[in-house]
Image (cartoon, rainbow, N blue to C red):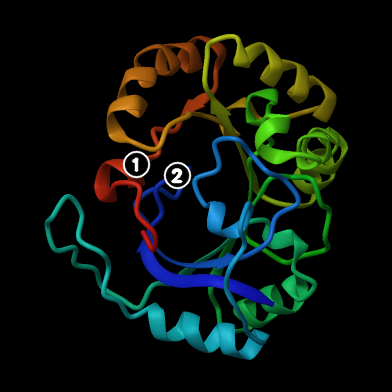
């Protein structure tokens, strides 16, 4: 499988925020989000081919640390880390994803899969972290060419999300750029069906602390009003927009 990077950091999004975790970032994606913060796994995918056993060995090695410093301060933890996050790119594209999950489970790791919710695979994980892409993610034809239409035809799969949440513990994370995005979120959730709204997290779009803080001023109250959870994308405040964090 094509692996972009494997590293130890603290989870910055969702209900496991702050948890020391080994991130396994696969390379390759079936979307081309305009605001993608990991273009080296989507727009221009890069990485090395690794077997499942090689990935598991790298995870075990990374789990003992060290963690990156937070806001310039050395970060201590009682390792090794027990959590693994399979992210991307789109990890559900990897044909070995089922085997990798099984091997990590055998090694007693807690497994989170971060996915856009466009592909339904029979994987074994502890948390399915699904980030459906709204219309605000569509790239321009000038930038993406044929990928603009491919992206739009692929991103909206409430049927896949419904199947995933029926089989897994889950959280739904939506990237929000403006207040009207919430109407699209409500429509999507209605198509998915019965959803625990406390497991729906809204995240401000942005890759720097100033933008995130500015959008949080109206997004956090909106979450409170509608019964959603607010997700500040804490890793940006800790580390900035840097790779391997």
> Where 212 sits versus 240, above or below?
above
User: What residue is rendered at 81% in x and 41% in y?
Assistant: 146
- In the picture, measured across the screen, residue 137 lies left or right of residue 192, that is left
Disc 1 designates what residue? 234
Quarter of the figure with residue 41: bottom right
Quarter of the figure with residue 186: top right
User: What residue is rendered at 66% in x and 82% in y?
Assistant: 103
Disc 2 designates what residue? 13
Locate the N terminus and report the quarter of the image it occupies. bottom right
> Where 60 sits versus 203, above or below?
below
Cα gap from disc 2 to disc 1, whole angstroms: 6 Å
User: What residue is rendered at 49% in x and 17% in y?
Assistant: 223
Element under disc 2: loop
Residues at discs 2 and 1 in contact (Cβ within 8 Å): yes
Neighbor class of circle 2 (other Cα within 10 Å; few <14, some 14-19, many 20+) is many
Neighbor class of circle 1 (other Cα within 10 Å; few <14, some 14-19, many 20+) is some
């Amino acid at each position: 499988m094509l692996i972009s990077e494997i590293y130890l950091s603290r989870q910055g999004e969702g209900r496991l925020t702050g948890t020391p975790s080994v991130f396994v970032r696969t390379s390759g994606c079936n979307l081309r989000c305009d605001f993608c913060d990991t273009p080296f796994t989507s727009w221009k995918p890069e990485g090395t081919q690794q077997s499942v056993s090689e990935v598991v060995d790298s995870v075990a090695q990374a789990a003992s640390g060290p963690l990156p410093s937070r806001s310039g301060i050395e970060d201590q933890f009682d390792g090794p880390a027990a959590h693994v996050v399979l992210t991307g790119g789109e990890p559900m594209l990897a044909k070995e994803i089922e085997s990798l999950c099984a091997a990590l489970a055998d090694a007693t790791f807690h497994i989170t899969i971060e996915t856009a919710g466009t592909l339904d695979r029979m994987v074994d994980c502890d948390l399915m972290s699904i980030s459906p892409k709204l219309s605000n993610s569509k790239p321009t034809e000038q930038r993406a060419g044929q990928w603009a239409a491919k992206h739009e035809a692929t991103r909206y799969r409430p049927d896949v999300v419904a199947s995933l949440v029926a089989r897994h513990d889950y959280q739904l994370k939506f990237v929000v750029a403006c207040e009207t995005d919430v109407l699209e979120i409500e429509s999507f959730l209605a198509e998915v069906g019965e959803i625990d709204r406390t497991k729906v997290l809204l995240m401000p779009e942005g890759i720097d602390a100033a933008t995130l803080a500015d959008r949080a001023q109206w997004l956090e109250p909106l979450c409170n009003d509608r019964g959603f959870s607010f997700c500040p994308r804490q890793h940006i405040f800790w580390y900035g927009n840097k790779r391997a964090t």
